[in-house]
Image (spheres, grey):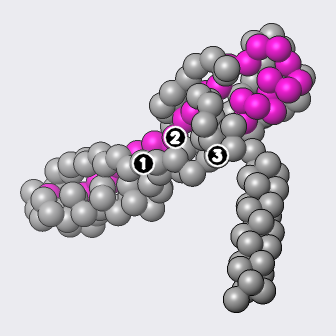
Amino acid sequence: MKLIKKFNLLTFVTLLFAVSFQASAFDWEDLLRPGPSPGYGRGGETCTARDRGHEEHWGGHGSCRSCLREHGDCNYTCSVDSFQAEATGQRRDGSSDRFVAYSDYSDFDARDRALERCYDARLDNCYISNSDVRRVVTERGRCY
């Protein structure tokens, strides 16, 4: 019985050490402090951090912590792609109508929605006449 208790205690201590080592290897502070998310926000949100002066390398830093490690003062910006598509279709009298649709998920989704609106209006020969993507800032602030 004493052997089982010692084995359980040894297993518990080993497990505790392994978990604490793993937690220190993972950058928990980046998840807890305000600033860029790891890049898996809503609909493909991406975040970058840059020093408040001149960023010397393209693209900025992936987290506030890495930016603050190299520079004293940093800002973060999070953004998401917004897709827009326009479908055009013809009425039976020969005139044409245009329908615009938006999506935060993908260009395909925006195109699909625009075509769906065109066909729902009972138009013929619906096609995508235009599509565009814009980067929309969702959040920005100072790294602490």
Which residue, given by chain and number where applicable, does mark 1 sit on?
A: 104
What's the mark number on residue 80? 2
Residue at the farthest top position: 53
Indicate left or right for 118 with 23 as reference.
Answer: left
What's the mark number on residue 91? none
Query: Which residues lie in the magenta part?
Result: 63-91
The nearer-to-camera label among 3 and 1 is 3
Which amino acid, mark 2? Answer: Val
Residue displayed at 77% across by 13% down: 73
Which residue, given by chain and number where applicable, does mark 3 sit on?
A: 38
Which amino acid, mark 3? Answer: Pro
Marks 3 and 2, Cα distance to the nearest angstrom?
13 Å
Locate residue 101, reporting x and y percent. 31, 48
Nearer to me, 84 or 136 = 136
Q: Is residue 83 magenta?
A: yes
Q: Is residue 86 magenta?
A: yes
Answer whether labels 2 and 1 touch (C-beta < 8 Å): yes
Residue displayed at 85% across by 18% down: 71
